[in-house]
Amino acid sequence: MPPASDPLRTPSPAPTTEQMLLAQNQALDAQDRALDEIHDTIREVHGVGRAIGAESELSRRLIDDIADDVERGSAGVARGQETMRVVEYRSDTKALHSAICFLVLLFVVLVLFKVG
């Protein structure tokens, strides 16, 4: 291949207007196809983003419901514990033993008076 500065080499002819317009149209068509692909990808990403947003909203609502249920359950447990403390206080075994002794003594006294 002769060097570029070879005087025997004939320069390539300049492109015609039609060739330049054809090349420009082909470049524009390629850009249009690329933009269409980008547009489709953005639409897909947008759809995925909306789905993720809906799922996260549903998850947030479910977590809020669970938190409310836990709060109600904790309040119920606290009420139950308070009730147990009241029942435990009221059912003091000393008072029950004293009542049983009193009733046994009363029974003995009644039996003695009835027999005698």
Image (cartoon, grey):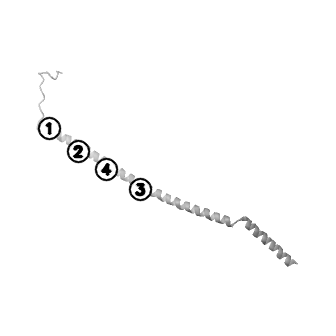
Picture residue at 25% right of the left edge, 45% below the top: 35
Mark 4, secondary structure of its residue: helix
N-terminal-most mark, 4 or 3: 4
Which numbered disc covers residue 32? Answer: 2
Question: Dot 4 corresponds to which residue?
Answer: 43
Marks 2 and 1, how far apart at CA: 18 Å
Marks 3 and 2, how far apart at CA: 37 Å
Q: Quadrant of residue 88?
A: bottom right
Name the amino acid type tagged 3: Glu
Picture residue at 39% right of the left edge, 52% below the top: 52
Q: Quadrant of residue 101?
A: bottom right
Front tag of 3 and 1: 3
Mark 2, secondary structure of its residue: helix
N-terminal-most mark, 2 or 4: 2
Crowding at dot 2, Cα within 10 Å, few <14 / some 14-19 / many 20+, comes out as: few
N-terminal-most mark, 3 or 1: 1
Picture residue at 73% right of the left edge, 65% below the top: 93
CB atoms of marks 2 and 4 within 8 Å: no
Direction from residue 79 to residue 21 in the image, left or right: left
Direction from residue 99 to residue 15 in the image, left or right: left
Question: Dot 1 corresponds to which residue?
Answer: 20
Question: Dot 3 corresponds to which residue?
Answer: 57
The quadrant in which the N terminus is found is top left
In front of the other: 110 or 13: 110
Marks 4 and 1, how far apart at CA: 34 Å
